[in-house]
Image (tube, rainbow, N blue to C red):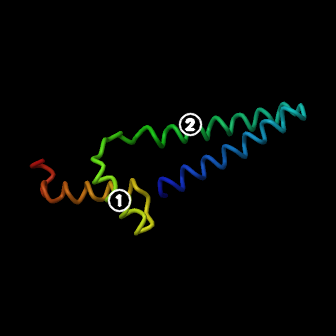
Amino acid sequence: MTELSTRLMLLLALVVVCVGVVAAAVGRQWDLLTVFAGVAALLVAMWVRQRIHRVSVTLRPDLAHWVEDRASTAGEPFDDVLDRAVATYRHGIVTDERAG
């Protein structure tokens, strides 16, 4: 799954669940409210877990523009292009994992 589509799907699901929470609260359907709140908690946990494994990096502006251009040209997420570029660079420097 791509990063953007995963985040978008989680956000849309969370919005739908929040609407369900509000509707259940207004209708005083406490069992349904509990189910919606549980699903919302699971969605938030998935979103946090997805973001926790990424390391924040600062990229020079010219390189960031290059990655943005490549991503928009190929129709890929920024993170995927950046990951592939770093992996290609690393492969050129270290060809043997034990030597690195």
* Picture coordinates of residue 91, whole percent (x, y): 18, 58
Total marks placed: 2
- Pick whichever, 78 or 97, lies toward us: 78
- Residue at left 43%, top 37%? 52
Residue 35: which quarter of the image?
top right
- Pick whichever, 29 or 62, lies toward us: 62
- Pick whichever, 32 or 59, lies toward us: 59
Q: Secondary structure at mark 2?
A: helix
The residue that disc 1 covers is: 81
Q: CA distance from mark 1 to mark 2?
A: 26 Å
Q: Secondary structure at mark 1?
A: helix
* Picture coordinates of residue 13, whole percent (x, y): 66, 48
Residue 24: which quarter of the image?
top right
Q: Amino acid at mark 1?
A: Val
Q: Residue furthest right?
A: 27
Residue 35 to residue 96: above or below = above
Q: Residues within 10 Å of mark 1 (few under 14, many from 20)?
A: many
Name the mark on residue 45: 2
Name the mark on residue 40: none
Q: Residue furthest bottom?
A: 74
Q: Amino acid at mark 2?
A: Ala
Residue 39 to residue 77: above or below = above
Residue contact between numbered discs 1 and 2, judged by CB atoms under 8 Å: no
Q: Residues within 10 Å of mark 2 (few under 14, many from 20)?
A: few
* Picture coordinates of residue 80, whole percent (x, y): 38, 57
- Residue at left 67%, top 38%? 40
Q: Earlier in the sequence, mark 1 or mark 2?
A: 2
- Residue at left 60%, top 52%? 9
* Picture coordinates of residue 4, whole percent (x, y): 51, 54
In this image, 21 relative to 29: left or right?
left
Q: Residue furthest left?
A: 99
Which of pointers 1 and 2 indicates the residue nearer the eye? 1
